[in-house]
Structures are given as C-alpha cells and as structure tokens.
Image (cartoon, coloured by chain):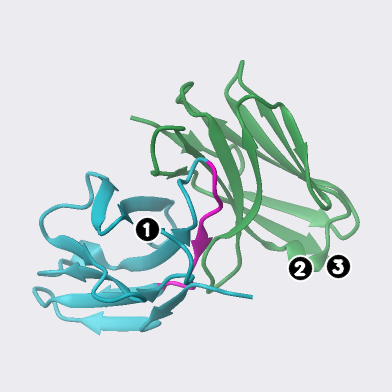
Amino acid sequence: EPEVTQTPSHQVTQMGQEVILRCVPISNHLYFYWYRQILGQKVEFLVSFYNNEISEKSEIFDDQFSVERPDGSNFTLKIRSTKLEDSAMYFCASSYGRSSYNEQFFGPGTRLTVL
Amino acid sequence: GESVGLHLPTLSVQEGDNSIINCAYSNSASDYFIWYKQESGKGPQFIIDIRSNMDKRQGQRVTVLLNKTVKHLSLQIAATQPGDSAVYFCAETLNTGNQFYFGTGTSLTVIP
C-alpha cells in the first residue's frame, strides 16, 4: 500500500540553525501539506501546496518557514533560523484532491528538537 | 478563529465494549469532518469522515454522528479491541479550503 514517508525521523539542532525536513508524498497525489504537533498539544496546520505554489498557510507559517517541491517526488519544509518553540513533531501529508473531498494521508512524522 | 475541542481527554473501556468519543466544534461554517486515529510514534490515520449534509455515517465497526444544531461530533467504536488503543482526533475544514483544524485528542485505552 502506498504511504507517505518522512526523513529524518528525529532531528536535533541548535537554536538559530536552519533545518530541512523531507517528505515523499504518495506518487499520484497532487496536494501536499505540513502540520506540526507540539508535545501534548493538538495537530496544527502549517501550509498546503498545490501546483507548485502555496495554496493556504496558517499564522504559524511565517517568514522563517518555506516549502519546496524540488523534484517530482520530494516535498520539503525549511525552517531558516530555528527557535526553541519550533520543537515539535512535523507531519507531512498528501491527498489526491482538495481536502474537503479527499482523504489526507499522513507520514510518520519528524521529531524536531531545538536546543 | 475556528476551534475544535474534545470533552474527555482520556477514556478507558473494557475489551468488547462500545466506545464513544466526543468532539465539539465552534465554526458553524465547517462542512467536512474527519476522525483520525494516532498510535504512539505514528502519524494520524484516517478513520471515517462525514459531510455536513449528513448526520450519520457508518464504517467497519465505527460510526460517526454529526449534530449541527449543537456543533457536536461523535465517534462510536463497536466491540472495542486492544488494537483500538490510541489517541483519537476530530478535525474540521471548510469546503472552500484545505486547512484542517484539529481537536486536542482523546486517549482511548482498551483494557483486556
């Protein structure tokens, strides 16, 4: 069964450093998403991406964040200068069509720890 | 802004019993709802969805009920099994968007 994969599973970084989280969505999916989940809190939407551009983003997704689909398979989330409060699980998801009509499939997540 | 919340943070049930997990949402414009299951160390996994033009939808051992009048969503799991132990989230979205709003989650523990 196709699945969303994410690498690395755990990333430890120093405050102020840049990190890139990687995702490989399901191959025939067209919509891609990043979510984060701070420990013990709810899953929060960051951004959705379609047709090589951001289609929607939340207030969390400020100028420190960027997304890219550098090739036909990868979808990345970059945090330019990490802060302590960026420590969280980051989930990538993909769907074939728009969220309101199509199931989003989630990856296993990357745990980001900012020291 | 939108908010989705769960009434009970934890729920323990005996194996074989039915489980009911509740969720309240605040945005009356939300028109699509999903229940997700999240096992430890894994990402959310789709369980069942429902659109706002329905009040009930059934899957395999799961039923979702939607009460738009009081903005309430529930997930019923029949004959709960140990493998059902997980955190359950409800999420809502608008028909016009791609952004899902998640609830805090209810931790379901099934006692063998």
Callout 3 amino acid: Pro
Residue A12 placement (x, y as % from top left): 26, 83
Question: Along the line of sight, which residue is nearer the eye, A91 or B83?
Answer: A91
Callout 2 amino acid: Gly
Identify residue for label 2.
B83
Residue A115 seen in the figure: no
- Marks 1/3 in contact by CB < 8 Å: the verdict is no
Mark 3 neighbour class, 10 Å CA radius: few under 14, some 14 to 19, many 20 or more: few
Using the image, name the chain to which the residue with label 3 belongs.
B
Mark 1 or 2, closer to the camera:
1
Q: Which mark is residue A33?
A: 1
Q: Is disc 1 placed on a helix, strand or loop?
A: strand
Identify residue for label 3.
B112
Question: Along the line of sight, which residue is nearer the eye, A50 or A38?
Answer: A50
- Marks 2/3 in contact by CB < 8 Å: the verdict is no
Is A11 on the left or on the right of B92, as rendered?
left
Mark 1 or 3, closer to the camera:
1
Residue B64 seen in the figure: yes
Residues at discs 1 and 3 both on one chain = no
Using the image, name the chain to which the residue with label 2 belongs.
B
- Marks 1/2 in contact by CB < 8 Å: the verdict is no
Q: Which mark is residue A51?
A: none
Residue A1 placement (x, y as % from top left): 64, 75
**Quadrant of the rendered structure where residue B72 is?**
top right
